Amino acid sequence: MQDVTCRLRRIGGLLLMALLLCGVSALAWAQDSLLERGRYLVTTVMACGNCHTPKDAEGRPVPGKELAGGGVAVDIPPFAVTSSNITPDVETGIGAWTDAEVKRAITHGERPNRGPQAGKPLAAMMAANFFKALLPRDLDAVVVYLRSVPAVRNSLPGPVYRAPVRREALAEADRGFTERDMQDPVRRGAYLATIAHCLECHTPMDKGVLQFDTALGAGGRPFLPAFIKGLPEGWKGSVSRNITSHPEQGLRGWSDAQIKRAITQGIGPDGRKLREPMAYAWYAGIRDEDLDAVVAYLRSLPALPR
């Protein structure tokens, strides 16, 4: 009887060890899944490196400087800012920030209430009013990935604000999205286009205010080299185009393949090269099924003239 009891105990111990090992493996798998999802979002759809990674004179990311800040500097009447270092460097990046503080910065444009820039908001060029739409799992994934990139020491000038920072509310982001929405191509496309902040550039401004309520996606917003630094040498500026379903001025006459090529390669339907600051190099990595969803969403935008 004693031998039976001992054998049962050994079996029980082995089962417990197996369960523990399975738990550890499951945790590691979940972490890897978050890491890979975060990598995908940051390096493609959200195109964080388009602003936060320094680039050479030809617009190529500088090796070893991923997300180290200084990729873009903007000096316009309301503010003068340089994109921040978002690597895990403790002194010049976000290494000392808690996960909650990183999430708050991404979704609300607020810095931690401590340090030399305590209480200062992030500039309006940080698309927090779009990123607030991030699903909880995706926001977690972004933070996990940002923690994983090499820490780079890169001290940058602080922001100068000449007017209060304002971000126009975007109804789609304010309403938010659900996991169920991801099963519908148009809703998933709306989600992806929102966190890709497409409509930040492709919506016109009037007296410094983005016209989300009346001209969403109608284009016509100018980007001028006098105010933006960090784009390829010789860049002469650009004007965002109309991406609504308007038959002449918008995308209705474009094929799906032409829209995808414009997004991922920066080539128009006539073969001409489109201009920055569109993040073609980052959007090139968006998966085909996600591109299909984005196109489905763009087709749903009401036709508006520029």
Image: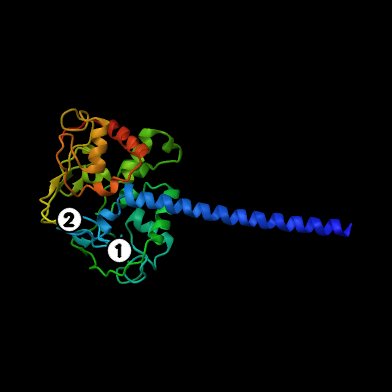
Q: Position of residue 158 (x, y in %)?
A: 24, 67
Q: Is residue 152 above or below residue 128?
A: below
Mark 1 surroundings within 10 Å by alpha-carbon count, few (fewer than 14), some (14 through 19), many (20 or more) = few
Residue occupying the point 30% across, 46% down: 196
Q: Earlier in the sequence, mark 1 or mark 2?
A: 2
* Quadrant for the N terminus in the image: bottom right
Image mark for residue 58 = 2
Q: Tag 1, which secondary structure?
A: loop
Q: Name the residue nearer the viewer: 18 or 141.
A: 18
Q: Position of residue 33 (x, y in %)?
A: 47, 50
Q: Tag 2, which secondary structure?
A: loop
Q: Is residue 100 above or below residue 300?
A: below
Q: Name the residue nearer the viewer: 13 or 78.
A: 13
Distance between the alpha carbons at the discs numbered 1 and 2: 17 Å
Q: Is residue 195 visible to the viewer in this orientation of the structure?
A: yes
- According to the image, label 1 marks what residue? 64
Amino acid type of the residue that numbered disc 1 sits on in the rendered structure: Gly
Residue occupying the point 25% across, 31% down: 302
Mark 2 surroundings within 10 Å by alpha-carbon count, few (fewer than 14), some (14 through 19), many (20 or more) = few
Q: Is residue 227 left or right of residue 255?
A: left
Q: Position of residue 59 (x, y in %)?
A: 19, 55
What colouring method underlies this structural image? rainbow
Q: Position of residue 199 (x, y in %)?
A: 25, 43
| Numbered disc total | 2
Residue 51 found in image quarter: bottom left
Q: Is residue 152 above or below residue 58?
A: below
Residue occupying the point 35% across, 41% down: 287
Q: Is residue 91 left or right of residue 163?
A: right
Q: Is residue 124 visible to the viewer in this orientation of the structure?
A: no
Amino acid type of the residue that numbered disc 2 sits on in the rendered structure: Glu
* Quadrant for the C terminus in the image: top left
